[in-house]
Amino acid sequence: MMLHMSSHRLVSLGGFCAASLAFLGGLSVANAAEPMVGIRSLAMGDSMRAMATQSEAMLLNPAGLALSQQFQDTGFYSLRLPSLGHFLHASISDSVTNPYFALGLYYNYLRETPRFGFRLRNGGDDLVQQVVGADIVRTGHESGTTLAIPIGQRLTLGASLKYAYYSLRAQLGQDMAPPGQSAADSRIDRENSVDLGSTGSVVTFDFGMTLSPFAGLHVGVVGQNLWPHGYELPTLLGIGLGYQVGDRLLLAVDTVINFTGNEACSDMTQTTCNETTRRTTVRVGGGAEYTIAGKVPLRLGYLYDDNLRAHHATMGLGYVSKDSGFALDVSVRQRVAPGSETVLLFGIRILRDGIAQEGG
């Protein structure tokens, strides 16, 4: 990488790269270590590991794929602000054809492009500062297959085999020079980028179970990324409880423990971040879904993320037409403290034959 600056400014660039890595460590840990969730789960405080079905089960707990009898095609798009994160999911599942097992296939795509600035100061007697910018490009591809088996009427077991490719790069270049200083005086070559050491492909797997000890109550336990690969695919233990109250109301609460988590920046908009330190982190969330006239599910929830020490409010709305065989959903998660972050999700599900679980 060629840099148009004097040798004493290379030292400053080293500081820039170090700060970039610290900031990006916080960014990637915060978002990569965040479990991938589905349409209903996002609106219900990232819960539903005890009762997730179809595409939701492939993301949360593979054992749930055998909880309903249905063909389902699912697609959704999620937007994260202000870090400009884009997430696409497509899946197909079948829990009808064979009474002894359910099978699903899915693909996830992630692209995130946050920006931040950093001050560089010339060495020696030259105390002129410049502010340079970095475009962060984080991309990911993940595909997997899920198999679930019902054991009697109350127990299901499931596993997912996953392949993932992730890349994290810093595109150095666009200067934000202070007043009185030209861009030419403080330029970093825009064509250069830095690989931040998080590029590669991995194979891992999930294993989960669901148990219904009596009518209405569901318990789910899942281990995710049991071949650990650091913060991009952290090893997680999820425990969920769900309770179905009649035909209209569903309640759920989950706890997710991240055994390979890091202490991350609490505010992704800040320009500096302290060095990250490894520790076990916890996410706790829950929510409710109330279905009106069997067609319109309303969802509310709350999530606390110990990694960011952040509180989130969640909500969602859907429309399910079992006669026409489709469902539309909108879900929102809003961080309320500290800082602000919004996640929007828009989804469509094609329902074909079989028996769907309430609301989904």
Image (spheres, grey):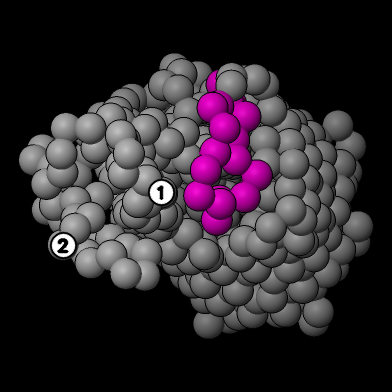
Secondary structure at badge 2 equals: helix
Tell which residue pokes out farthest to the front in this image: 125
Q: Residue at x 37, y 45 (%)?
A: 127
Residue 160, percent across and down?
A: 45, 31
Which residue occupies the foreground of this view, 42 or 196? 196
Q: From where the camera sits, is residue 319 visible?
A: yes
Q: Which residues are magenta?
A: 260-276
Q: Residue at x 42, y 45 (%)?
A: 104
| Quadrant of image for the C terminus | bottom right
Q: Amino acid at mark 2?
A: Ala
Report the number of discs.
2
Note whether 230 is above or below 330 in the view shown. Answer: above
Which residue occupies the foreground of this view, 308 or 19? 19
Q: Which residue is mark 1?
A: 119
Secondary structure at badge 1 equals: strand
How crowded is the residue under tag 2: few (<14 C-alpha within 10 Å), some, or many (20+)?
A: few
Q: Is residue 265 magenta?
A: yes
| Residue 337, quarter of picture | bottom right
